[in-house]
Image (cartoon, rainbow, N blue to C red):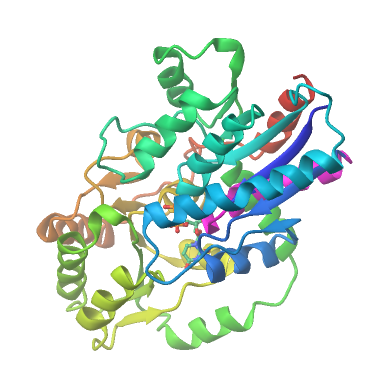
Amino acid sequence: MKKLLLCFGTRPEAIKMAPVIHELKKQEIAFKVCVTAQHREMLDQVLDFFEITPDYDLDLMRAGQTLNGLSASIFTGIDKVFDDWLRQAQPDSNTQFGVVLVHGDTTTASMIAQATFHRQIKVGHVEAGLRTYNKTSPFPEEINRQLISRIADVHFTPTEKASSNLLKEGIPVERIALTGNTVVDSLHWAAEKLAGKKLSQEIFGLKALLNNDNKLVLVTGHRRENFGEGLEEIGEALLKLSNRTDLEILYPVHLNPNVKDPVQKRLGNKPNIHLVSPVAYPTMLWLMQRAVVIISDSGGVQEEAPAFGTPVLVTREYSERMEGVEAGFSVLVGTNRQKIVEEATRLLNNPPDLSNRQNPYGDGKAAERIVQFLKGL
Ligand code: UDP
């Protein structure tokens, strides 16, 4: 088995790498974890829940950090991690002994992939092959993903569509492993961990805040391409919806000031719009289950919501996750206020029954398949 280093930096990456970490532990395979902590608090919430203690923590989050500033810090910081990992793992002379696993589409993932390539170490890409083929949407994630695909030596794809994208781009079939998305493994792990446990203080607090007789609309949003006008449009749509007396809107607001400040300013004064800090992952699962409609630009939420049969209005013009749209779990609404209000009203008035449809993103065994493939390298 090649030596493994898993690198990630944000909340969604941690949620989706956790099952791989759990599977490696279960199979008693040695590995190290490095976090860049591109998002500090939101990452730590997840590390804690999934019981992950990083071996290396670059702690790179800085207020007002630019993408280039972050990229530069990753390049500067990662060599020391590689050096230590290589020393401890007792490499052979040509350094072809190890694999660095990165996840998804973040700046952390694409910069670490490039830094790994510079050191002539192999790269494995978890959640590979998603595409919009639109350079600016999602920004910068689409190009991050494409860059990683040029560099990676093995590609773990969540769906057939993702595998087919990579094949069309000339990636050899033997380097692609269709595994499903580990996001579903995480849902299963969380359900097992939480079974029979008391609800958390956070959930108790939300139960007290929300009126049980009202329909719940859950909102999240953080995409760069929606900063400014997009967020304003979504805000206007939420204000319009909040005129209904039979619903409540709960919005865990992303900590990025480009999101937090305008959202607070526009939506802070409505009694049935509750703006709260990002919630813990189990709380988010509880909310997704309770919601009648989710309005979100999040990738992970689009993949998780089908497990709860809750429809998602995706506030994006383009999505690299069209499987959920095609299976009827989500609707691409963009950021036009009227379209959001119309679609939300339709779903609130006639909630679809999605309970018997299969989640197109995975079956909960993705991590097992990833580790199996890694063992065969
Ligand atoms: N999430 C969470 N708390 C929140 C909002 C989201 O735990 O307050 C979880 C959500 O369930 C999903 C992930 O964070 O698993 C998605 O993260 P985000 O929307 O930041 O990123 P994306 O998935 O778009 O990359």
- 8 lies left or right of 55: left
Q: Nearer the viewer, residue 214 or 344?
A: 344
Residue at 16% across, 62% down: 341
Q: Quadrant of the C terminus?
A: top right
- State the image coordinates of residue 344 (x, y, percent, origin top left): 23, 59
Q: Nearer the viewer, residue 18 or 108?
A: 108
Find the magenta span and give its range. 9-28
**Which SS does the magenta portion mostly show?**
helix
Say how many tags the image has: 0
Residue at 62% across, 67% down: 44
Q: Answer with the quarter of the image where residue 58 lies.
A: bottom right
Q: Quadrant of the N terminus?
A: top right
On screen, residue 165 above or below 296: above
- State the image coordinates of residue 19 (x, y, percent, origin top left): 69, 46
- State the image coordinates of residue 16 (x, y, percent, origin top left): 59, 48
- 54 lies left or right of 162: right
Residue at 35% across, 52% down: 312
Residue 67, can we see it?
yes
On screen, residue 262 above or below 132: below
Residue 20, can we see it?
no
